[in-house]
Image (cartoon, grey):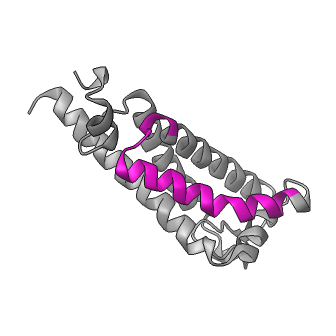
C-alpha cells in the first residue's frame, strides 16, 4: 500500500472517530436543551444567558459538524470546527478542575454539579485532546478514503 493511500485511510479513521463522537454527543443532548444549557452554565465562565444559548445551540453544531465529517463533506472546514470545539472543551474542563469545581463535563448529556469523587477531568481532557488530534490531522490533510469531497470534487492534491 502506498504512503498516500495509507494516509487516506488514517483520514477516514480520523473522520469517523471525531465525527462519530460529535454526532453521539449532540444526539444525546439535543432532546434535553435545558440540561445542555445547565451543563454549560455549570462551568461558570460566562454570563448565565450566554451560557444558556450556547447550551441550546451546541448539540446542533455537534450534530451538523459530526455528520459532515462522517460523510467527508467540507472536511477541512468541519475539522477546524471540530478541533476548535475539542480545544474549547479541554480549556473548559481544565479550568473547572483548576478552580476546584465538581461538575460532570456534560459532554454526552447530563452535566452540572457532582460529588468530587465523581469527576473524571484527566480522562475527559485526554479524550478531547485525542479527538482534537483527529481534527488537526484532517485540517492538515483532509483527503481521505470514502469521502464525498473526493466523489464530488475529485482527489485532493494532498493525497499524492
Residue 44 colored magenta? Answer: no
Q: Position of residue 87 (x, y in %)?
A: 61, 44
**What's the residue at 55%, 74% (across, down)?**
28
Name the quadrant containing residue 47.
Answer: bottom right
Q: Quadrant of the C terminus?
A: top left
Q: Is residue 81 above or below residue 64?
A: above
Where residue 110 sits, quadrant-wise, is bottom right
Can the viewer see residue 118 in this picture? Answer: yes
Q: Residue at x 50, y 58 (%)?
A: 22
Q: What residue is at 29 percent from the left and 45 percent from the top? A: 12
Residue 53 in the image: x percent, y percent? 80, 60
Answer left or right for 74 relative to 9: right
Residue numbers of the magenta segment? 50-77
Reply above or below: 79 against 2.
below
Q: Nearer the viewer, residue 42 or 4?
A: 4
Q: Is residue 21 left or right of residue 85?
A: left
The spot of residue 117 in percent (x, y) is 66, 76
Residue 113 in view:
no
Q: Quadrant of the N terminus?
A: top left
Residue 61, magenta (yes or no): yes
Position of 60 with respect to 138 (left or right) is right
Q: Tell whether 38 sits left or right of 160.
A: right
Amino acid at each position: 500500500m502506498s504512503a498516500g493511500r495509507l494516509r487516506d485511510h488514517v483520514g477516514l479513521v480520523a473522520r469517523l472517530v471525531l465525527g462519530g463522537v460529535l454526532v453521539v454527543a449532540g444526539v444525546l443532548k439535543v432532546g434535553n436543551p435545558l440540561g445542555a444549557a445547565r451543563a454549560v452554565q455549570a462551568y461558570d465562565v460566562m454570563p448565565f444567558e450566554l451560557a444558556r444559548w450556547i447550551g441550546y445551540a451546541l448539540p446542533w453544531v455537534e450534530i451538523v459538524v459530526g455528520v459532515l465529517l462522517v460523510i467527508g463533506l467540507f472536511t477541512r472546514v468541519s475539522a477546524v470546527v471540530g478541533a476548535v470545539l475539542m480545544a474549547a472543551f479541554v480549556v473548559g474542563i481544565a479550568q473547572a478542575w483548576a478552580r476546584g469545581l465538581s461538575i460532570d463535563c456534560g459532554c454526552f448529556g447530563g452535566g452540572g454539579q457532582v460529588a468530587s469523587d465523581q469527576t473524571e477531568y484527566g480522562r475527559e481532557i485526554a479524550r478531547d485532546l485525542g479527538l482534537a488530534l483527529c481534527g488537526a490531522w484532517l485540517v492538515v490533510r483532509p483527503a481521505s478514503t470514502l469521502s464525498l469531497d473526493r466523489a464530488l470534487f475529485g482527489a485532493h492534491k494532498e493525497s499524492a
